[in-house]
Image (spheres, rainbow, N blue to C red):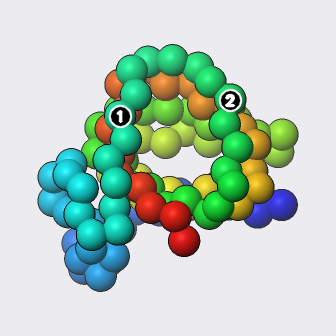
């Protein structure tokens, strides 16, 4: 199975992907926010996300990844995981 991919984007790459400068719905991007918590999740589609605020640890059967403010993340279709939000998380996301 594919792994979680975490990237740091340049300003040009953000513009190319239509990532807004502030947390807001924009084009294909939707907003998601969550208070500190732990929960299980499964991805039925590949998700891309850009984190504006917070920190989360995502644990799968194969890896544990810390995701934080400024990260652009791709979660592969079919992945099952556990999210542990140590801080409130605020992100935009879309499905590809």
User: With 74 as the anchor, is 19 left or right in this view?
Assistant: left
Q: Which residue is mark 1?
A: 33
Image quadrant in which the N terminus is located: bottom right
Image quadrant in which the C terminus is located: bottom right
Nearer-N-terminus badge (1/2): 1
Tag 1, which secondary structure?
strand
Q: Where 33 sits versus 15, above or below?
A: above
Query: Which percent across, then down, holds residue 93?
Result: 41, 55
Tag 2, which secondary structure?
strand
Using the image as rendered, state which of residue 41 and residue 83 is in the foreground: 41
Using the image as rendered, state which of residue 33 and residue 4 is in the foreground: 33
| Label 1, label 2: how far apart the Cα atoms are | 16 Å
Residue 47 falls in image quadrant: bottom right
Residue drawn where x is 69% and y is 55% of the image: 44
Residue 4 falls in image quadrant: bottom right
Residue drawn where x is 76% and y is 55% of the image: 78
| Circle number at residue 40 | 2
Q: Where 42 sits versus 39, above or below?
A: below
Q: Residue furthest left?
A: 21
Query: Which percent across, then down, holds residue 13?
Result: 32, 77
Asked whether residue 10 appears in the rendered view, the answer is: no
Residue drawn where x is 23% and y is 63% of the image: 26
Query: Which percent across, then down, holds residue 90?
Result: 32, 38
């Amino acid at each position: 199975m594919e792994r979680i991919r975490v990237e740091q984007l340049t300003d040009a790459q953000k513009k190319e992907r239509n990532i807004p400068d502030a947390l807001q719905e924009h084009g294909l991007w939707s907003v998601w926010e969550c208070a500190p918590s732990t929960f299980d999740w499964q991805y039925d589609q590949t998700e891309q996300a850009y984190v504006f605020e917070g920190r989360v640890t995502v644990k799968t059967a194969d890896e544990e990844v810390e995701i934080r403010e400024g990260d652009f993340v791709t979660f592969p279709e079919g992945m099952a995981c556990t999210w542990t939000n140590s801080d409130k998380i605020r992100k935009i996301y879309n499905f590809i």
